[in-house]
Image (cartoon, helix red, strand yellow):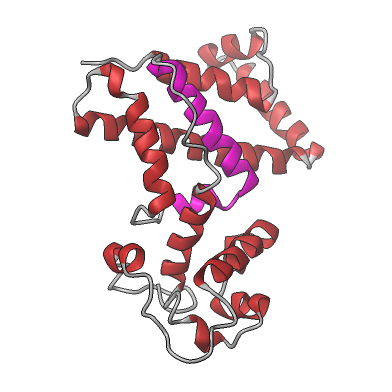
């Protein structure tokens, strides 16, 4: 992305971003830091959504000139990487693993869901991020340790973690969309009428049977747990 969010061809150099975060500066101590800039961007995204995050608005939040931010985050793509890793620091990694890898993975998924619900821009951000900062690496290390009892090889462990994270991100994005739709009862009623008409037309017997069956609890936590159980309980170790 360009400095305020357009497309760019170079991308983020993870080694420069995470291992060489900035050059030492002489003279007066800066009035702000990369951490402060990142925190301001996260607060803005939490309040108004990811599309509200521009270098100009972040600069205004930290009380700096926009040009002075570019030595810390040269473009929005870099800023997004910093934001994702910043909130990933909220994920606990020091808890004792039980050795029950399925149970531990479910705990990890619930932690990820809670994080994404606190920062509702995160599922979309994860679809575009390119690198793993120190907080993200710490959580990945925790997840890989949880998978040690499976005996899976390294590539398979990474695939399982990627699959789990993608599932959680997709589910949370759906939760957020459904919650917004629930604010419009007329829309929900119209959708119910439409499905009832389709089920009654005789051309969709499987759908009619499904819709006539007793419903499941619709509480978001219970729904997530059911879907998660199906995913993790179906994972093999070969």
| Depicted 159 relative to depicted 198: above or below | below
Residue at 58% over, 77% down: 32
- Please name the residue shown 62% across and 36% down the image: 175
Residue 218, picture quadrant: top right
Residue 91: image location, x then y, percent: 52, 41
Residue 221 is left or right of residue 161, and the answer is: right
Q: Is residue 18 above or below residue 202?
A: below
Residue 74: % across, % down: 42, 78
Which range is magenta? 101-127
Q: Is residue 113 magenta?
A: yes
Q: Is residue 47 above or below residue 102?
A: below
In this view, the residue in front, 218 or 186, is 218
Which of these two is toward me, 43 or 133? Answer: 133
Q: Residue furthest bottom?
A: 27
Q: Quadrant of residue 141?
A: top left
Residue 7 is situated, as x and y percent measured from the top left of the image, at 38, 72
Can you give x and y, in whole percent of width and height, for residue 65 in the image? 59, 88
Residue 236 belongs to magenta span? no
Residue at 69% from the left image edge and 32% from the top image edge: 191
Q: Quadrant of the C terminus?
A: top left
Please state, as top left, top right, bottom left or bottom right, where the N terminus lies in the image: bottom left
Q: Does residue 50 lie above or below 192 as drawn?
A: below
Q: Residue at x 46, y 17 (%)?
A: 103
């Amino acid at each position: 992305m360009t400095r305020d969010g357009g497309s760019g061809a170079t991308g983020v150099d993870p080694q420069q971003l995470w291992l060489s975060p900035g050059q030492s500066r002489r003279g007066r101590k800066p009035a702000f830091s990369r951490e402060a800039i990142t925190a301001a961007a996260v607060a803005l995204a939490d309040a108004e959504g990811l599309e509200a995050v521009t270098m100009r608005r972040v600069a205004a939040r930290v009380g700096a000139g926009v040009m002075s931010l570019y030595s810390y985050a040269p473009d929005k793509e870099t800023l997004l990487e910093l934001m994702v890793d910043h909130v990933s620091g909220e994920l606990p990694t020091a808890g004792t693993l039980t050795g029950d890898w399925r149970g531990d993975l479910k705990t990890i998924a619930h932690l990820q869901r809670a994080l994404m619900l606190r920062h509702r821009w995160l599922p979309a951000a994860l679809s575009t991020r390119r690198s793993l900062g120190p907080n993200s690496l710490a959580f990945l290390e925790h997840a890989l340790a949880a998978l040690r009892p499976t005996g899976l090889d390294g590539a398979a462990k990474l695939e399982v973690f990627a699959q789990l994270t993608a599932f959680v991100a997709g589910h949370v994005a759906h939760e957020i969309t459904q919650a917004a739709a629930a604010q419009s009862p007329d829309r929900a009623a119209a959708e119910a009428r439409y499905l009832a008409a389709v089920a009654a037309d005789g051309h969709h017997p499987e759908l009619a049977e499904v819709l006539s069956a007793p419903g499941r609890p619709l509480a978001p936590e219970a729904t997530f747990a059911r879907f998660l159980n199906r995913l993790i309980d179906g994972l093999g170790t070969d």
